[in-house]
Amino acid sequence: MALLARLGLEPEEEEFYAAQLGGILAHIDRLREVDTEAIPPTAQVVPLANRLRQDEPLPRLSPEEALANAPETRDGYFVVKAIQDAGDA
Amino acid sequence: MASISELHDRLGRREISAGELLEEQLTTIEEQEPRVHAYLRLTAELARAQAQAADRLFREGGPVGPLTGIPAAIKDVLSVQGVETTAGSKILAGYRPPFDATAVARLKAAGLVLLGITNCDEFAMGSSTENSGYFVTRNPHDPQRVPGGSSGGSAAAVAAGEAVYALGTDTGGSIRQPAALCGVVGMKPTYGRVSRYGLIAFASSLDQVGPLSRSVEDAALVLEAIAGVDARDATSADRPVDFLSELEAGVEGLRLGVPREYFQVEGLEPGVRSAVQEALRRLERAGAELVDVELPHTDYGLAAYYIIAPAECSSNLARMDSVRFGLRDESAPNLLESYLRTRRAGFGPEVRRRVMLGTYALSSGYYDAYYLKAQKIRTLIAEDFQRAFRDCDAIVSATAPTVAFEIGAKMNDPLAMYLNDVLTLGGNLAGLPGISVPCGTSEGLPVGLQVLTPHWQDARALRVARAYEMVRDAA
């Protein structure tokens, strides 16, 4: 689960969190007591219809502003690490 | 300590300038901060420029409003253009938003003097501000105790006189609970009242921006400035904004619902219960009618909340990816390792817990049993409130089951920490407006009275809270 969530955990941390999350899930399991067969789910609690705006350009960030917080940029792009280890290709 | 309208009058009569008011505040901050630690960072230079601009308006007879020149603080989850904004997390250290959150932009337009950015639990996840990636904020009433959370820095700053008002955010009680524990007013508006544009998202279907202040009237004034539809948040509502005209209308003839379940929750301290019951007696003497109401799914609220909020946060925090902003562990040999090492270095324990819990609840095979189930329970909780509001105009209870607890007391027991929110999170699940107003003390520490009202009846919640304030202060 930690890997799926892209969290790097050490083995001893995995045990620590597994125990804590087990306790929380035990509490959450009380939801099974409630019969919800005929109940619709709620995703958004205040009813609002789709709100559309005119398809016109609005003021937006310049590329420099959008890139200003990035750890690494080149030629107006974000730089990411290679998907494979260097040398693997 | 003076209210916003008193300060506004003094500024208008030129008894004090915005610049002088600011310098007084900065002196108070200097005196209090070694004890309270409410602020992550001060913005004195920006504040001086804003105070000068406010003084120019007062001097030249320009357009001034109630908030012009009033010094305030903002929680570290709302984007302030060019000012480091980190959501209390190491993973966003150094991040300077290139734009203002709508709530911040509206305060600036209303004449904000920004004192600084207040501490909070990391990504607003917590009830004590102990989960901040930076340091622990202390309760001004007892520095050995927590200020509540997640907007603990904002609540402590207002309580210690380090800001006239502050903005916070509330996902499960994160404005109301710290307001209660610090003895100030805190309001979570109806979901959709205040734009969430520029708010660093925790749980998007629950998050709302709102004020913390010394008085109910101050909260109403701040809410007037920040509320209203915004094209940049499709969930913001186009509803009339008027929180002042009914404010002094009193409670005579109003039916206040007292939910039996809210007075029987696990861990409700006797001193908190009796302070709230005394407040209800005073409201009754002021002309309100107390009626019993039921919220039968209260026992399931915490469990549903701790599926829905972590599920949404696990999705929202996926953007903390070391690519566009924030930390990056440069030692990583590839992209996957970059994610893992950066998020390992940047996220604290509570964020990890919730991201794992949410990822689990959304994963295939568990989705129906957890996420979908929780959404159905959410329907039942919202229906409980709808049914209760047929018999009453507002629902009243304690804001939090306990007074401020000692630092460290609940850090090793996440479930005990979560129980702090058991009386507030129903309002978030149902999208209701709710306000906490100080109602006496227990063991010498502040207790909060919570008032919940139906969707869009924010003005009525403020009115009931204001009526209580009057009978409280008259006694």
Image (cartoon, rainbow, N blue to C red):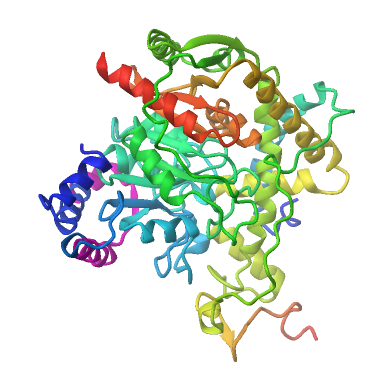
Q: Is residue B387 magenta?
A: no
Q: Position of residue A21 (x, y in %)?
A: 68, 38
Q: Nearer the viewer, residue A23 or B69?
A: B69
**Magenta segment boundaries in residue numbering:** B30-57
Q: Residue at x 76, y 24 (%)?
A: A30
Residue B320 rendering spot, x and y as whole percentages: 61, 63
Above or below, B185 against B191 in this view is above
The quarter holding residue B263 reads top right
Q: Is residue A47 left or right of residue B247?
A: right
| Residue B293, position as x, y percentages in the image | 62, 13
Q: Is residue B286 left or right of residue B411?
A: left
> From the viewer's perspective, is B232 left or right of B402?
right
Q: Is residue B408 in sight in this rendering?
A: no
Q: Quadrant of residue A3?
A: bottom right
Query: Which image quarter holds the C terminus of chain A?
Result: bottom right
Which residue lies at the image location 48% right of the left edge and 69% below the top edge?
A: B99
| Residue B78 shows up from this direction | yes
Per the picture, the main secondary structure of the magenta-coloured stretch is helix
Where is residue B80? Give x, y as percent.
43, 63
Q: Residue at x 46, y 55 (%)?
A: B103
Q: Is residue B42 magenta?
A: yes
